[in-house]
């Protein structure tokens, strides 16, 4: 009996922990994502004054797609399908005519996104409501 109660409590606690680590799905046709400005090289050295940092925004739903470019630290993502999308951003700078890129920072951490984007798959409005 004690083992059964222990097992039930263990399963409940495990379920609560898994919910705490679950991702959040943002349902919207458009979502604005934001990130901190890149001000340093990968080794921690501060970028020279006047360095222009550009950002590439990617969506991943099995395939990785470049969605847009910006020098701002936010971007409005417009979804046109109902797939679940992971979002990624990569920084780039140009030094001496050569473009250098960071790794893509995905919303996922070890393959588990803290958030994903999905267009809201709402059914059409009910029509011709009546009493019969």
Image: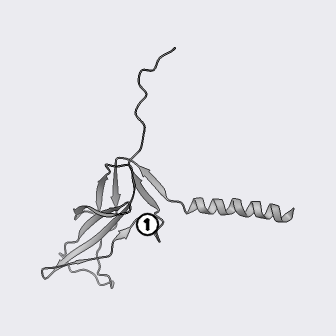
Crowdedness of circle 1 by 10 Å Cα count: few (<14), some, many (20+)?
some
Q: Is residue 9 visible?
A: yes
Picture coordinates of residue 25, whole percent (x, y): 46, 54
Name the residue at 77% across, 63% down. Answer: 7
- Give the color scheme: rainbow, by chain, secondary structure or one colour: one colour
Name the residue at 73% across, 64% down. Answer: 10
Picture coordinates of residue 40, whole percent (x, y): 29, 79
- Looking at the image, residue 114 sits to the left or right of residue 4; the answer is left
Q: Is residue 37 visible?
A: no
Name the residue at 21% across, 80% down. Answer: 48
Classify residue 77 by image quadrant.
Answer: bottom left
Dot 1 lies on which element? loop
Furthest residue to the right? 1
Classify residue 35 by image quadrant.
Answer: bottom left
Picture coordinates of residue 31, whole percent (x, y): 35, 52
Q: Is residue 123 above or below residue 19?
A: above
Q: Is residue 121 above or below residue 22?
A: above
Q: Quadrant of the N terminus?
A: bottom right
- Near-viewer residue (51 or 60): 60
Disc 1 target residue: 108
Furthest residue to the top? 132
Name the residue at 19% across, 76% down. Answer: 51
Image label count = 1
Picture coordinates of residue 92, whole percent (x, y): 24, 73
């Amino acid at each position: 009996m004690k083992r059964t109660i222990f097992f039930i409590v263990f399963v409940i606690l495990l379920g609560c922990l898994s919910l705490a680590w679950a991702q959040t799905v943002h349902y919207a046709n458009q979502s604005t994502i934001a990130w901190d400005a890149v001000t340093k090289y990968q080794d921690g050295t501060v970028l020279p004054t006047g360095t222009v940092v550009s950002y590439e925004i990617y969506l991943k739903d099995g395939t990785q797609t470049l969605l847009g470019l910006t020098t701002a630290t936010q971007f409005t993502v417009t979804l046109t399908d109902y797939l679940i999308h992971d979002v990624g951003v990569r920084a780039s700078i140009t030094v001496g005519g050569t473009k250098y890129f960071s790794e893509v920072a995905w919303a996922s951490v070890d393959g588990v996104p803290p958030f994903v984007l999905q267009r809201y798959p709402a059914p059409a409005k009910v029509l011709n409501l009546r009493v019969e």
